[in-house]
Image: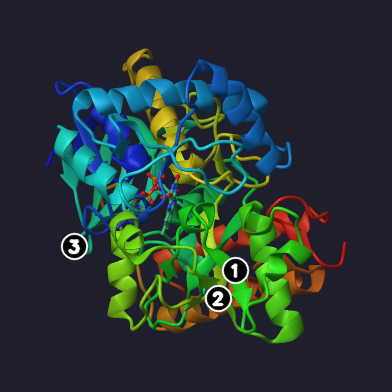
Amino acid sequence: MLKEYDVIIIGNGIAGLYASMNLPKEMKVLNICKDFAWECNTFYAQGGITTARDEKDIGLHSRDTLEAGSFANDKAAVETMSKGSLGVIEDFIRRGFHFDMENGNLQYTKEAAHSIARILHVGDATGRYMHDFMMQQNQHYLLKNSLVYDLLIEDAKCFGVKVMIEYKPYVLKAKKVVIASGGVGSLYEYHTNAKSISGDIQGICYEKGIELENMHYLQFHPTVFTKIPWARKMLLTEALRGEGATVIDDEGNRFLFDYDKRGELASRDIVSHAIYDYKQKTNKEVYLDFGNFDEKYFKQRFPNIYKSFRDVGYHPPKERIPISPAFHYSIGGIKTDINGRVLDIDNLYAIGECASSGVHGANRLASNSLLEGLVFAKRAAEDILGSGFDLKFHGFDEEDKTILHEKNDKIIKRQLRRVMWDHVGIVRSRSGLMKAKRFIYEQRNVGRLLELRLNSAKAIIEHALNAPKSIGSHLMKDQ
Ligand SMILES: Cc1cc2nc3c(=O)[nH]c(=O)nc-3n(C[C@H](O)[C@H](O)[C@H](O)COP(=O)(O)OP(=O)(O)OC[C@H]3O[C@@H](n4cnc5c(N)ncnc54)[C@H](O)[C@@H]3O)c2cc1C
Protein backbone atom coordinates (compact mmCIF):
# COMPACT_ATOMS: atom_id res chain seq x y z
CA MET A 1 0.00 0.00 0.00
CA LEU A 2 1.28 3.45 -0.96
CA LYS A 3 1.40 6.21 1.64
CA GLU A 4 0.74 9.08 -0.80
CA TYR A 5 -2.01 9.39 -3.40
CA ASP A 6 -3.34 11.87 -5.90
CA VAL A 7 -6.89 11.23 -4.73
CA ILE A 8 -8.30 9.33 -1.77
CA ILE A 9 -12.03 8.56 -1.91
CA ILE A 10 -13.73 7.59 1.34
CA GLY A 11 -16.54 5.26 0.30
CA ASN A 12 -17.31 2.60 -2.24
CA GLY A 13 -20.98 3.27 -2.98
CA ILE A 14 -22.35 4.88 -6.11
CA ALA A 15 -20.77 8.28 -5.43
CA GLY A 16 -17.30 6.97 -4.52
CA LEU A 17 -17.16 4.43 -7.32
CA TYR A 18 -18.39 6.76 -10.05
CA ALA A 19 -15.94 9.48 -8.97
CA SER A 20 -13.18 6.89 -9.18
CA MET A 21 -14.38 5.64 -12.59
CA ASN A 22 -14.10 9.20 -13.89
CA LEU A 23 -10.45 9.56 -12.86
CA PRO A 24 -7.80 8.26 -15.30
CA LYS A 25 -6.09 4.96 -14.66
CA GLU A 26 -2.66 6.64 -14.54
CA MET A 27 -3.59 8.63 -11.44
CA LYS A 28 -2.89 7.27 -7.99
CA VAL A 29 -6.43 6.89 -6.70
CA LEU A 30 -7.52 4.90 -3.64
CA ASN A 31 -11.07 4.02 -2.63
CA ILE A 32 -11.50 3.10 1.03
CA CYS A 33 -14.48 1.32 2.55
CA LYS A 34 -15.31 0.16 6.00
CA ASP A 35 -16.59 -3.32 5.46
CA PHE A 36 -17.06 -5.64 2.49
CA ALA A 37 -17.03 -3.85 -0.85
CA TRP A 38 -20.82 -4.14 -1.20
CA GLU A 39 -21.85 -3.19 2.34
CA CYS A 40 -23.24 0.21 1.43
CA ASN A 41 -26.68 1.72 0.82
CA THR A 42 -26.12 1.70 -2.92
CA PHE A 43 -26.06 -2.09 -2.91
CA TYR A 44 -29.46 -2.24 -1.21
CA ALA A 45 -31.24 0.32 -3.41
CA GLN A 46 -34.24 -1.35 -4.94
CA GLY A 47 -36.61 0.88 -6.88
CA GLY A 48 -34.43 2.61 -9.42
CA ILE A 49 -32.77 5.77 -10.56
CA THR A 50 -34.52 8.90 -11.79
CA THR A 51 -33.65 10.49 -15.07
CA ALA A 52 -35.18 13.34 -16.97
CA ARG A 53 -36.83 11.57 -19.93
CA ASP A 54 -35.34 14.10 -22.35
CA GLU A 55 -34.38 17.79 -22.54
CA LYS A 56 -38.07 18.73 -22.39
CA ASP A 57 -38.58 16.86 -19.10
CA ILE A 58 -35.83 18.76 -17.23
CA GLY A 59 -38.26 21.51 -16.26
CA LEU A 60 -40.90 19.10 -14.93
CA HIS A 61 -38.40 16.86 -13.15
CA SER A 62 -36.89 19.94 -11.50
CA ARG A 63 -40.37 21.15 -10.56
CA ASP A 64 -41.26 17.76 -8.97
CA THR A 65 -37.95 17.79 -7.04
CA LEU A 66 -38.56 21.33 -5.77
CA GLU A 67 -42.13 20.52 -4.75
CA ALA A 68 -41.06 17.39 -2.83
CA GLY A 69 -38.39 19.52 -1.13
CA SER A 70 -40.92 22.19 -0.07
CA PHE A 71 -38.98 24.63 -2.31
CA ALA A 72 -36.18 24.70 0.28
CA ASN A 73 -33.87 23.28 -2.42
CA ASP A 74 -31.09 25.12 -4.23
CA LYS A 75 -32.77 25.61 -7.62
CA ALA A 76 -29.49 25.77 -9.56
CA ALA A 77 -28.33 22.49 -8.00
CA VAL A 78 -31.66 20.84 -8.86
CA GLU A 79 -31.43 21.90 -12.50
CA THR A 80 -27.80 20.83 -12.65
CA MET A 81 -28.77 17.37 -11.39
CA SER A 82 -31.67 17.02 -13.79
CA LYS A 83 -29.64 18.18 -16.80
CA GLY A 84 -26.76 15.97 -15.71
CA SER A 85 -29.02 12.90 -15.60
CA LEU A 86 -29.07 12.61 -19.40
CA GLY A 87 -25.27 12.40 -19.62
CA VAL A 88 -24.66 9.96 -16.76
CA ILE A 89 -27.39 7.54 -17.85
CA GLU A 90 -26.09 7.67 -21.40
CA ASP A 91 -22.58 6.97 -20.05
CA PHE A 92 -23.81 3.89 -18.16
CA ILE A 93 -25.58 2.53 -21.23
CA ARG A 94 -22.58 3.28 -23.46
CA ARG A 95 -20.31 1.39 -21.05
CA GLY A 96 -22.64 -1.63 -21.40
CA PHE A 97 -25.05 -1.41 -18.47
CA HIS A 98 -28.54 -2.83 -19.08
CA PHE A 99 -31.60 -1.20 -17.54
CA ASP A 100 -34.92 -3.04 -17.95
CA MET A 101 -36.37 -2.67 -21.43
CA GLU A 102 -39.84 -2.89 -22.93
CA ASN A 103 -40.36 -3.50 -26.68
CA GLY A 104 -36.80 -2.40 -27.38
CA ASN A 105 -37.09 0.84 -25.38
CA LEU A 106 -36.03 1.76 -21.86
CA GLN A 107 -38.77 0.87 -19.38
CA TYR A 108 -39.66 3.73 -17.04
CA THR A 109 -41.68 3.38 -13.88
CA LYS A 110 -43.42 6.00 -11.76
CA GLU A 111 -42.86 6.61 -8.07
CA ALA A 112 -44.54 8.81 -5.49
CA ALA A 113 -44.67 12.54 -6.29
CA HIS A 114 -43.20 12.16 -9.81
CA SER A 115 -45.54 13.67 -12.42
CA ILE A 116 -44.60 11.06 -15.02
CA ALA A 117 -42.88 7.66 -15.24
CA ARG A 118 -39.14 8.46 -15.32
CA ILE A 119 -37.46 5.87 -13.05
CA LEU A 120 -35.09 3.41 -14.71
CA HIS A 121 -34.61 0.10 -12.94
CA VAL A 122 -33.20 -3.38 -13.05
CA GLY A 123 -35.85 -5.61 -11.50
CA ASP A 124 -36.12 -4.67 -7.83
CA ALA A 125 -32.37 -4.64 -7.23
CA THR A 126 -31.23 -1.64 -9.27
CA GLY A 127 -28.56 -0.62 -6.75
CA ARG A 128 -27.03 -4.07 -6.59
CA TYR A 129 -26.70 -4.35 -10.38
CA MET A 130 -25.29 -0.83 -10.68
CA HIS A 131 -22.82 -1.51 -7.87
CA ASP A 132 -21.62 -4.79 -9.42
CA PHE A 133 -21.18 -3.02 -12.75
CA MET A 134 -19.22 -0.14 -11.23
CA MET A 135 -16.99 -2.57 -9.31
CA GLN A 136 -16.09 -4.13 -12.66
CA GLN A 137 -15.56 -0.78 -14.36
CA ASN A 138 -13.46 0.84 -11.64
CA GLN A 139 -9.76 0.49 -12.39
CA HIS A 140 -8.43 1.87 -9.14
CA TYR A 141 -7.40 0.10 -5.97
CA LEU A 142 -9.95 -0.56 -3.20
CA LEU A 143 -8.91 -0.79 0.44
CA LYS A 144 -11.61 -2.83 2.22
CA ASN A 145 -12.37 -3.33 5.92
CA SER A 146 -10.62 -0.07 6.71
CA LEU A 147 -12.01 2.74 8.73
CA VAL A 148 -11.28 6.43 8.26
CA TYR A 149 -11.41 8.01 11.70
CA ASP A 150 -9.87 11.41 11.00
CA LEU A 151 -9.10 13.91 8.25
CA LEU A 152 -5.69 15.58 8.06
CA ILE A 153 -6.57 19.25 8.03
CA GLU A 154 -4.23 22.18 8.59
CA ASP A 155 -4.56 25.84 7.62
CA ALA A 156 -7.92 25.12 5.95
CA LYS A 157 -6.33 22.53 3.63
CA CYS A 158 -6.93 18.80 3.58
CA PHE A 159 -3.83 16.62 3.27
CA GLY A 160 -5.26 13.11 3.60
CA VAL A 161 -6.84 10.78 6.13
CA LYS A 162 -6.12 8.71 9.18
CA VAL A 163 -7.31 5.18 8.66
CA MET A 164 -7.47 2.10 10.89
CA ILE A 165 -6.55 -1.11 9.12
CA GLU A 166 -6.85 -4.22 11.26
CA TYR A 167 -6.79 -2.01 14.35
CA LYS A 168 -3.50 -0.43 13.26
CA PRO A 169 -3.50 3.32 12.53
CA TYR A 170 -2.06 4.66 9.26
CA VAL A 171 -1.59 8.15 7.88
CA LEU A 172 -2.41 8.24 4.14
CA LYS A 173 -1.70 11.50 2.36
CA ALA A 174 -3.55 12.74 -0.69
CA LYS A 175 -3.62 15.84 -2.84
CA LYS A 176 -7.41 15.62 -2.98
CA VAL A 177 -9.78 13.85 -0.59
CA VAL A 178 -13.33 12.98 -1.62
CA ILE A 179 -15.82 12.10 1.12
CA ALA A 180 -18.43 9.68 -0.25
CA SER A 181 -19.23 7.97 3.03
CA GLY A 182 -23.04 7.91 2.92
CA GLY A 183 -25.64 8.78 5.55
CA VAL A 184 -26.34 8.18 9.22
CA GLY A 185 -28.61 5.08 9.40
CA SER A 186 -26.98 3.36 12.37
CA LEU A 187 -27.89 6.26 14.65
CA TYR A 188 -31.49 4.98 14.65
CA GLU A 189 -33.13 1.95 16.24
CA TYR A 190 -35.18 1.20 13.12
CA HIS A 191 -33.50 1.85 9.79
CA THR A 192 -33.08 0.41 6.32
CA ASN A 193 -29.37 1.19 5.90
CA ALA A 194 -26.25 -0.93 5.45
CA LYS A 195 -24.42 -1.59 8.70
CA SER A 196 -21.40 0.43 7.56
CA ILE A 197 -23.41 3.65 7.52
CA SER A 198 -23.06 5.58 10.77
CA GLY A 199 -22.25 9.22 9.99
CA ASP A 200 -18.58 8.89 11.03
CA ILE A 201 -17.24 11.51 8.66
CA GLN A 202 -20.06 13.97 9.39
CA GLY A 203 -18.93 13.50 13.02
CA ILE A 204 -15.35 14.42 12.07
CA CYS A 205 -16.62 17.51 10.22
CA TYR A 206 -18.65 18.56 13.25
CA GLU A 207 -15.54 18.28 15.44
CA LYS A 208 -13.42 20.30 13.00
CA GLY A 209 -16.00 23.03 12.46
CA ILE A 210 -16.57 22.08 8.81
CA GLU A 211 -20.03 23.28 7.88
CA LEU A 212 -22.85 20.76 8.11
CA GLU A 213 -26.18 21.81 6.68
CA ASN A 214 -29.77 20.65 7.25
CA MET A 215 -28.78 17.58 9.25
CA HIS A 216 -32.30 17.53 10.75
CA TYR A 217 -33.89 16.80 7.36
CA LEU A 218 -34.08 13.04 7.62
CA GLN A 219 -36.31 10.86 5.56
CA PHE A 220 -38.30 8.03 7.08
CA HIS A 221 -39.42 5.42 4.58
CA PRO A 222 -43.11 4.64 5.05
CA THR A 223 -43.15 0.96 4.09
CA VAL A 224 -40.63 -1.06 6.07
CA PHE A 225 -41.02 -4.49 7.64
CA THR A 226 -39.45 -4.01 11.07
CA LYS A 227 -40.38 -7.30 12.75
CA ILE A 228 -36.96 -8.89 12.27
CA PRO A 229 -34.02 -8.98 14.70
CA TRP A 230 -31.35 -7.64 12.29
CA ALA A 231 -30.24 -4.00 12.46
CA ARG A 232 -31.12 -3.36 8.82
CA LYS A 233 -34.89 -3.63 8.44
CA MET A 234 -36.54 -4.83 5.22
CA LEU A 235 -37.69 -2.17 2.80
CA LEU A 236 -40.66 -2.49 0.48
CA THR A 237 -39.81 -0.23 -2.42
CA GLU A 238 -41.81 2.84 -3.38
CA ALA A 239 -42.26 1.28 -6.82
CA LEU A 240 -44.75 -1.17 -5.28
CA ARG A 241 -47.10 1.67 -4.39
CA GLY A 242 -46.33 3.29 -7.74
CA GLU A 243 -47.56 0.12 -9.43
CA GLY A 244 -50.71 -0.41 -7.35
CA ALA A 245 -49.91 -1.74 -3.83
CA THR A 246 -52.22 -0.18 -1.24
CA VAL A 247 -51.79 0.79 2.42
CA ILE A 248 -54.60 -0.57 4.60
CA ASP A 249 -55.44 -1.17 8.25
CA ASP A 250 -56.75 -4.43 9.83
CA GLU A 251 -60.17 -3.84 8.30
CA GLY A 252 -58.91 -3.02 4.82
CA ASN A 253 -59.53 0.73 5.22
CA ARG A 254 -57.31 2.85 2.90
CA PHE A 255 -56.90 5.57 5.50
CA LEU A 256 -54.13 7.49 3.65
CA PHE A 257 -56.83 9.35 1.69
CA ASP A 258 -57.91 10.95 4.99
CA TYR A 259 -54.46 12.60 5.06
CA ASP A 260 -53.80 13.45 1.40
CA LYS A 261 -55.90 13.17 -1.73
CA ARG A 262 -53.05 11.36 -3.55
CA GLY A 263 -53.32 8.46 -1.08
CA GLU A 264 -50.46 5.99 -1.62
CA LEU A 265 -48.87 8.30 -4.18
CA ALA A 266 -48.34 11.25 -1.84
CA SER A 267 -44.68 12.06 -1.10
CA ARG A 268 -42.76 9.96 1.40
CA ASP A 269 -42.92 12.32 4.36
CA ILE A 270 -46.70 12.62 4.06
CA VAL A 271 -47.18 8.85 3.88
CA SER A 272 -44.73 8.24 6.75
CA HIS A 273 -46.34 10.84 8.99
CA ALA A 274 -49.81 9.49 8.15
CA ILE A 275 -48.92 5.88 9.00
CA TYR A 276 -47.14 6.95 12.19
CA ASP A 277 -50.05 9.14 13.25
CA TYR A 278 -52.71 6.57 12.37
CA LYS A 279 -50.91 3.84 14.33
CA GLN A 280 -50.52 6.10 17.35
CA LYS A 281 -54.17 7.18 17.29
CA THR A 282 -55.83 3.84 16.59
CA ASN A 283 -53.31 1.28 17.82
CA LYS A 284 -54.12 -0.69 14.67
CA GLU A 285 -51.69 -2.70 12.57
CA VAL A 286 -50.99 -1.23 9.11
CA TYR A 287 -50.23 -3.36 6.03
CA LEU A 288 -49.00 -3.08 2.49
CA ASP A 289 -51.48 -5.01 0.36
CA PHE A 290 -50.74 -6.44 -3.08
CA GLY A 291 -54.28 -7.46 -4.08
CA ASN A 292 -53.88 -5.63 -7.40
CA PHE A 293 -50.91 -7.74 -8.49
CA ASP A 294 -50.85 -10.94 -10.48
CA GLU A 295 -48.40 -13.39 -8.83
CA LYS A 296 -46.49 -14.17 -12.03
CA TYR A 297 -45.93 -10.47 -12.75
CA PHE A 298 -44.99 -9.75 -9.11
CA LYS A 299 -42.43 -12.54 -9.06
CA GLN A 300 -40.86 -11.36 -12.28
CA ARG A 301 -40.93 -7.60 -11.49
CA PHE A 302 -39.98 -7.85 -7.78
CA PRO A 303 -37.97 -11.10 -7.56
CA ASN A 304 -35.88 -10.11 -4.53
CA ILE A 305 -38.83 -8.89 -2.50
CA TYR A 306 -40.72 -12.04 -3.46
CA LYS A 307 -37.84 -14.25 -2.33
CA SER A 308 -36.69 -12.40 0.77
CA PHE A 309 -40.22 -12.19 2.20
CA ARG A 310 -40.81 -15.89 1.50
CA ASP A 311 -37.62 -16.44 3.56
CA VAL A 312 -39.14 -14.64 6.58
CA GLY A 313 -42.52 -16.37 6.30
CA TYR A 314 -44.67 -14.08 4.09
CA HIS A 315 -46.05 -14.83 0.66
CA PRO A 316 -46.52 -11.66 -1.37
CA PRO A 317 -48.56 -10.84 -3.41
CA LYS A 318 -51.06 -13.30 -1.85
CA GLU A 319 -50.36 -12.08 1.68
CA ARG A 320 -50.26 -8.51 2.94
CA ILE A 321 -47.18 -7.45 4.94
CA PRO A 322 -47.25 -5.44 8.21
CA ILE A 323 -45.38 -2.18 7.79
CA SER A 324 -44.04 0.73 9.78
CA PRO A 325 -41.97 3.79 8.87
CA ALA A 326 -38.20 3.53 9.57
CA PHE A 327 -35.22 5.86 9.15
CA HIS A 328 -34.07 5.75 5.55
CA TYR A 329 -32.14 8.68 4.13
CA SER A 330 -30.07 11.63 5.29
CA ILE A 331 -31.01 14.71 3.25
CA GLY A 332 -28.57 17.21 4.70
CA GLY A 333 -24.89 16.73 5.35
CA ILE A 334 -21.52 18.28 4.57
CA LYS A 335 -22.17 21.56 2.79
CA THR A 336 -20.74 21.72 -0.73
CA ASP A 337 -20.86 23.86 -3.83
CA ILE A 338 -22.19 22.67 -7.15
CA ASN A 339 -18.95 20.77 -7.92
CA GLY A 340 -18.88 18.89 -4.63
CA ARG A 341 -16.22 21.14 -3.11
CA VAL A 342 -16.44 21.45 0.67
CA LEU A 343 -16.72 25.10 1.52
CA ASP A 344 -13.71 26.79 3.12
CA ILE A 345 -11.42 23.72 3.02
CA ASP A 346 -9.09 23.32 0.06
CA ASN A 347 -8.66 19.93 -1.61
CA LEU A 348 -11.72 18.45 0.09
CA TYR A 349 -14.90 17.25 -1.65
CA ALA A 350 -18.13 15.61 -0.44
CA ILE A 351 -20.55 13.80 -2.74
CA GLY A 352 -23.57 11.50 -2.50
CA GLU A 353 -25.65 11.00 0.62
CA CYS A 354 -23.05 12.47 3.01
CA ALA A 355 -23.21 15.82 1.20
CA SER A 356 -25.64 18.69 1.27
CA SER A 357 -25.52 19.83 -2.34
CA GLY A 358 -28.91 21.50 -2.02
CA VAL A 359 -30.77 19.25 -4.45
CA HIS A 360 -33.25 17.75 -2.00
CA GLY A 361 -34.43 20.77 -0.02
CA ALA A 362 -36.50 19.67 2.99
CA ASN A 363 -37.33 16.29 1.49
CA ARG A 364 -36.01 14.02 -1.24
CA LEU A 365 -38.02 13.05 -4.27
CA ALA A 366 -38.00 9.25 -4.60
CA SER A 367 -35.05 7.80 -6.56
CA ASN A 368 -33.22 11.11 -6.87
CA SER A 369 -30.38 9.95 -4.61
CA LEU A 370 -28.67 7.42 -6.88
CA LEU A 371 -28.86 10.14 -9.51
CA GLU A 372 -27.38 12.75 -7.17
CA GLY A 373 -24.51 10.32 -6.44
CA LEU A 374 -23.68 9.95 -10.15
CA VAL A 375 -24.06 13.56 -11.24
CA PHE A 376 -22.03 15.11 -8.41
CA ALA A 377 -19.38 12.37 -8.52
CA LYS A 378 -18.79 13.23 -12.16
CA ARG A 379 -18.70 16.95 -11.44
CA ALA A 380 -16.26 16.47 -8.56
CA ALA A 381 -13.99 14.27 -10.70
CA GLU A 382 -14.02 16.89 -13.46
CA ASP A 383 -13.30 19.65 -10.94
CA ILE A 384 -10.39 17.64 -9.52
CA LEU A 385 -8.94 17.08 -12.99
CA GLY A 386 -9.24 20.77 -13.78
CA SER A 387 -7.57 21.95 -10.58
CA GLY A 388 -3.97 22.08 -9.41
CA PHE A 389 -2.08 19.19 -7.82
CA ASP A 390 0.78 21.20 -6.37
CA LEU A 391 0.12 20.41 -2.71
CA LYS A 392 3.35 20.05 -0.69
CA PHE A 393 3.04 17.30 1.89
CA HIS A 394 4.66 17.71 5.27
CA GLY A 395 5.03 15.40 8.21
CA PHE A 396 1.99 14.09 10.05
CA ASP A 397 2.50 12.14 13.22
CA GLU A 398 2.20 8.39 12.55
CA GLU A 399 2.11 7.71 16.28
CA ASP A 400 -1.49 7.46 17.32
CA LYS A 401 -3.08 6.25 20.50
CA THR A 402 -6.68 6.43 19.26
CA ILE A 403 -8.95 3.87 20.87
CA LEU A 404 -11.80 2.90 18.57
CA HIS A 405 -13.99 1.15 21.14
CA GLU A 406 -14.35 1.46 24.90
CA LYS A 407 -15.93 -1.09 27.24
CA ASN A 408 -19.41 0.45 27.46
CA ASP A 409 -19.73 1.61 23.87
CA LYS A 410 -22.10 -1.16 22.80
CA ILE A 411 -24.59 -0.32 25.55
CA ILE A 412 -24.39 3.43 24.90
CA LYS A 413 -24.74 2.86 21.14
CA ARG A 414 -27.95 0.92 21.73
CA GLN A 415 -29.26 3.66 24.05
CA LEU A 416 -28.38 6.33 21.50
CA ARG A 417 -30.37 4.50 18.80
CA ARG A 418 -33.40 4.34 21.08
CA VAL A 419 -33.09 8.01 22.10
CA MET A 420 -32.80 9.11 18.45
CA TRP A 421 -35.82 7.01 17.45
CA ASP A 422 -37.96 8.23 20.36
CA HIS A 423 -37.00 11.91 20.39
CA VAL A 424 -35.43 12.78 17.05
CA GLY A 425 -37.64 10.60 14.86
CA ILE A 426 -40.68 11.19 12.67
CA VAL A 427 -42.41 13.66 14.99
CA ARG A 428 -40.27 15.88 17.23
CA SER A 429 -40.84 18.21 20.14
CA ARG A 430 -38.60 20.75 21.80
CA SER A 431 -38.68 18.86 25.10
CA GLY A 432 -37.83 15.57 23.37
CA LEU A 433 -34.94 17.15 21.48
CA MET A 434 -33.62 18.62 24.75
CA LYS A 435 -33.80 15.16 26.38
CA ALA A 436 -31.81 13.70 23.50
CA LYS A 437 -29.26 16.52 23.74
CA ARG A 438 -28.83 15.90 27.47
CA PHE A 439 -28.30 12.18 26.87
CA ILE A 440 -25.49 12.95 24.45
CA TYR A 441 -23.76 15.47 26.71
CA GLU A 442 -23.83 12.98 29.59
CA GLN A 443 -21.70 10.40 27.75
CA ARG A 444 -18.05 10.18 28.82
CA ASN A 445 -15.06 7.95 28.09
CA VAL A 446 -16.29 6.61 24.82
CA GLY A 447 -14.22 5.18 21.96
CA ARG A 448 -13.47 7.23 18.83
CA LEU A 449 -16.22 5.63 16.72
CA LEU A 450 -18.95 6.29 19.22
CA GLU A 451 -17.61 9.79 19.72
CA LEU A 452 -18.12 10.42 15.99
CA ARG A 453 -21.68 9.03 16.10
CA LEU A 454 -22.47 11.24 19.08
CA ASN A 455 -21.11 14.25 17.17
CA SER A 456 -23.39 13.52 14.20
CA ALA A 457 -26.38 13.02 16.49
CA LYS A 458 -25.53 16.33 18.20
CA ALA A 459 -25.52 18.11 14.84
CA ILE A 460 -28.93 16.64 13.94
CA ILE A 461 -30.42 17.70 17.27
CA GLU A 462 -28.89 21.19 17.19
CA HIS A 463 -30.18 21.79 13.66
CA ALA A 464 -33.63 20.52 14.68
CA LEU A 465 -33.69 22.81 17.72
CA ASN A 466 -32.77 25.74 15.49
CA ALA A 467 -35.69 24.95 13.17
CA PRO A 468 -38.80 25.25 15.32
CA LYS A 469 -41.22 25.22 12.36
CA SER A 470 -42.31 22.04 10.56
CA ILE A 471 -41.21 21.80 6.96
CA GLY A 472 -40.84 18.81 4.62
CA SER A 473 -39.41 15.87 6.51
CA HIS A 474 -38.98 17.87 9.75
CA LEU A 475 -42.17 17.71 11.81
CA MET A 476 -42.35 19.57 15.14
CA LYS A 477 -45.46 18.93 17.20
CA ASP A 478 -45.11 21.90 19.56
CA GLN A 479 -44.30 24.71 17.10
C1 LIG B 1 -32.79 -0.12 1.31
C2 LIG B 1 -32.52 1.11 0.50
C3 LIG B 1 -33.17 1.29 -0.71
C4 LIG B 1 -32.93 2.44 -1.47
N1 LIG B 1 -33.52 2.56 -2.70
C5 LIG B 1 -33.19 3.62 -3.48
C6 LIG B 1 -33.68 3.72 -4.81
O1 LIG B 1 -34.40 2.85 -5.30
N2 LIG B 1 -33.32 4.82 -5.55
C7 LIG B 1 -32.52 5.81 -5.05
O2 LIG B 1 -32.23 6.78 -5.76
N3 LIG B 1 -32.03 5.72 -3.79
C8 LIG B 1 -32.34 4.66 -3.01
N4 LIG B 1 -31.82 4.58 -1.75
C9 LIG B 1 -30.86 5.60 -1.30
C10 LIG B 1 -29.52 5.36 -2.00
O3 LIG B 1 -29.28 3.98 -2.08
C11 LIG B 1 -28.38 6.03 -1.25
O4 LIG B 1 -28.70 7.35 -0.95
C12 LIG B 1 -27.12 6.02 -2.11
O5 LIG B 1 -26.86 4.72 -2.57
C13 LIG B 1 -25.95 6.56 -1.30
O6 LIG B 1 -24.79 6.36 -2.05
P1 LIG B 1 -23.40 6.86 -1.48
O7 LIG B 1 -22.38 6.45 -2.49
O8 LIG B 1 -23.50 8.28 -1.10
O9 LIG B 1 -23.22 6.05 -0.11
P2 LIG B 1 -23.25 4.48 0.17
O10 LIG B 1 -23.66 3.70 -1.00
O11 LIG B 1 -24.02 4.28 1.41
O12 LIG B 1 -21.70 4.16 0.44
C14 LIG B 1 -21.03 4.68 1.55
C15 LIG B 1 -19.64 4.10 1.59
O13 LIG B 1 -18.85 4.78 2.58
C16 LIG B 1 -18.10 3.85 3.34
N5 LIG B 1 -17.80 4.43 4.66
C17 LIG B 1 -18.67 4.98 5.56
N6 LIG B 1 -17.99 5.41 6.64
C18 LIG B 1 -16.69 5.13 6.43
C19 LIG B 1 -15.51 5.30 7.20
N7 LIG B 1 -15.52 5.88 8.40
N8 LIG B 1 -14.33 4.85 6.69
C20 LIG B 1 -14.29 4.24 5.47
N9 LIG B 1 -15.37 4.06 4.69
C21 LIG B 1 -16.56 4.50 5.17
C22 LIG B 1 -19.01 2.64 3.41
O14 LIG B 1 -18.26 1.49 3.76
C23 LIG B 1 -19.56 2.62 1.97
O15 LIG B 1 -18.65 1.99 1.12
C24 LIG B 1 -32.05 3.43 -0.97
C25 LIG B 1 -31.42 3.26 0.25
C26 LIG B 1 -31.64 2.10 0.99
C27 LIG B 1 -30.94 1.94 2.29
Label disc, if present, on residue 287 of the rendered structure: 2
How many residues crowd around disc 3 within 10 Å: few (fewer than 14), some, or many (20 or more)? few
Does the beta carbon of the residue at mark 2 sit less than 8 Å from ligand 1? no
Cα separation between marks 3 and 1: 46 Å
How many residues crowd around disc 2 within 10 Å: few (fewer than 14), some, or many (20 or more)? many
Cα separation between marks 2 and 1: 6 Å
Single out the residue that lies furthest toward the left.
1
Secondary structure category for the residue under label 3: loop
Mark 2 or 3, nearer chain start:
3
Tell how many labels.
Answer: 3
Mark 2 or 1, nearer chain start:
1
**In the image, residue 55 lies at what x, y percent?**
51, 16
Q: Residue at x 42, y 71 (%)?
A: 233
The residue under label 1 is: 247
Q: Residue at x 62, y 53 (%)?
A: 265
Q: Are marks 2 and 1 in contact (CB under 8 Å)?
A: yes
Mark 3 or 1, nearer chain start:
3
Secondary structure category for the residue under label 1: strand
Q: Amino acid at mark 2?
A: Tyr
**In the image, residue 406 lies at what x, y percent?**
38, 77
Q: Nearer the viewer, residue 347 or 190?
A: 190
Q: Amino acid at mark 3?
A: Glu
